[in-house]
Image: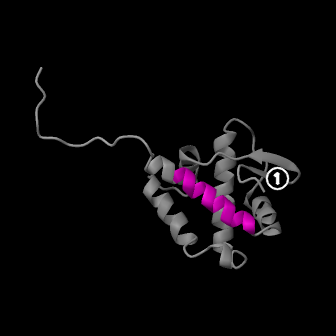
C-alpha cells in the first residue's frame, strides 16, 4: 500500500498528511489546538509497532479511520467526500500493516511541522542593534 493513497469502495483517495489534516482532526474532535490532537493520537497508538500490528482496539480503529479521513479531506477540501469512518476501518482491516504505515507517515509529517529540519531557530538576545 502507498501510504499517500488509499482505495475505499473502489475509489482511490490521495492523502495529505500535515498541518491541514491536523486542523481537520482538531475540528472533528472539537479541540482548540494541535497539542490536544497530538496527545490523543500519541496515547491511542502508544506501544503499537510491527510486532503487535494485528492486535489493536476498536478505539484505535476509530481514531485511525478519523486520521485517514482527515488526510483525505486535507488533500481534497472542495471534493464531496462520500465515505465514512466505517468504510475506512473496513479497508484498514483488510491489511493491518496499513495502520502502522499510516501512523508512521502521519507522525513524520507532523514532526516536520513541529520541528522543521534545516531551518535556523530564532534566538533571544538582550543586545540592542545599532541603527
Question: Which residue lies at the image location 56% right of the left edge and 44% below the top edge?
Answer: 20
Left or right of 129 in this view: 120: right
Residue reaching furthest to the front: 118
Q: Position of residue 5 (x, y in %)?
A: 75, 49
125 relative to 45, above or below:
above
Quadrant the N terminus occupies:
bottom right
Q: Is residue 65 visible?
A: yes
In-front residue for pair 7/131: 131
Q: Position of residue 68 (x, y in %)?
A: 68, 55
Q: Is residue 39 magenta?
A: no
Question: Which residue lies at the image location 61% right of the left edge and 48% below the top edge?
Answer: 17
Q: Decide: few, some or many residues near mark 1? Use Cα within 10 Å; few <14, some 14-19, many ≥20.
A: some
* The quarter of the displayed image where residue 119 is located: top left
Q: Main secondary structure of the magenta part?
A: helix
Residue reaching furthest to the right: 10
- SS for dot 1: strand
In-front residue for pair 110/88: 110
Left or right of 3 in this view: 114: left
In-front residue for pair 72/31: 72
Chosen colour scheme: one colour
Left or right of 85 in this view: 123: left
Question: Which residue lies at the image location 79% right of the left edge and 69% below the top edge?
Answer: 93
62 relative to 3, above or below:
below
Quadrant the C terminus occupies:
top left
In-front residue for pair 82/8: 8
- Which residues make up the magenta segment? 97-110
Q: Position of residue 117 (x, y in %)?
A: 45, 46
Q: Is residue 102 magenta?
A: yes
Amino acid at each position: 500500500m502507498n501510504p499517500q493513497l488509499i482505495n475505499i469502495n473502489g475509489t482511490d483517495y490521495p492523502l495529505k498528511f500535515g498541518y491541514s489534516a491536523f486542523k481537520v482532526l482538531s475540528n472533528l474532535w472539537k479541540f482548540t489546538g494541535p497539542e490536544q490532537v497530538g496527545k490523543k493520537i500519541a496515547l491511542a497508538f502508544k506501544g503499537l509497532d510491527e510486532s503487535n500490528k494485528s492486535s489493536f482496539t476498536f478505539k484505535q480503529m476509530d481514531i485511525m479511520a478519523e486520521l485517514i479521513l482527515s488526510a483525505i479531506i486535507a488533500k481534497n477540501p472542495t471534493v464531496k467526500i462520500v465515505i465514512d469512518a466505517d468504510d475506512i476501518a473496513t479497508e484498514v482491516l483488510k491489511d493491518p500493516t496499513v495502520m502502522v504505515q499510516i501512523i508512521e507517515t502521519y507522525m513524520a509529517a507532523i514532526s516536520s511541522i513541529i520541528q522543521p529540519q534545516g531551518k535556523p531557530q530564532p534566538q533571544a538576545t538582550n543586545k540592542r542593534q545599532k541603527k
